[in-house]
Amino acid sequence: MRKVFAMFDQSKTGFVETNKFVNILNTLGQNFDEDDLKQKIDEVDTEKEGKVNFDQFIVIVMPYLEEDDDEAMHEELKEAFRLYDKGGDGYITTKVLKEILKELDNKLSDTDLDGIIEEIDEDGSGTVDFDEFMEMMTG
């Protein structure tokens, strides 16, 4: 992020002008609501100086980047789930889940795995739907 900050702090003053944030987020390929962005800038630039330092810059930019990371994670997990949901039924069996967990961490004992499965499959159906899978993977 320091490189991005430096790219927009061309005068090397240690500040980025707040009117550059639309351009910054566009450069980072982020979708955003301009009113939401203006509100974030106003919350950070309380003195209405029209510029922010690096720490303030992070406070404004990071929520947009984290949201993108969450979305990407959700898509990757959805794709992984689809790979294991061979029948396309919208669920995987706890047996398959146990194999996945074993692959992710081969140090887990059968007792550990059974405990995890029991926690995830609260209704004891022997299956895990995508929401349960997502909850398990993201905590």
Image (spheres, rainbow, N blue to C red):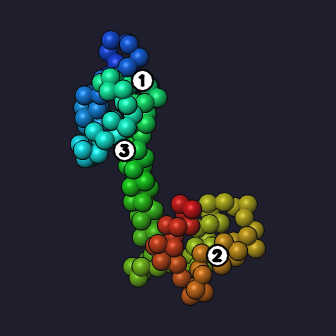
- First reached walking from the N terminus: tag 1 or tag 3: 1
Q: Is mark 1 on a helix, strand or loop?
A: loop
Q: Residue at x 60, y 81 (%)?
A: 122
| Residue 12 point in image, percent of width and height | 37, 12
Q: Is mark 3 on a helix, strand or loop?
A: helix
| Residue 72 point in image, percent of width and height | 40, 53
- In the depicted structure, whether residue 117 falls above or below residue 123: above
For the residue marked with disc 3, what is the amino acid? Tyr
Residue 137 numbered tag: none
Q: Which residue is drawn at 72% across and 64% down?
A: 108
Q: Which of marks 1 and 2 is in front?
A: 1
The residue where tag 3 is placed is 64
Q: Observer-nearest residue: 82 or 120?
A: 120
Q: Observer-nearest residue: 110 or 4?
A: 4
Crowding around mark 1 (Cα neighbors within 10 Å: few <14, some 14 to 19, many 20+) is some
The residue where tag 2 is placed is 119
Q: Which of marks 2 and 3 is in front?
A: 3
| Residue 95 point in image, percent of width and height | 60, 79
In the rendered structure, are the residues bearing label 2 and label 3 in contact, judged by CB atoms less than 8 Å apart? no
Residue 53 numbered tag: 1
Report the number of numbered marks: 3
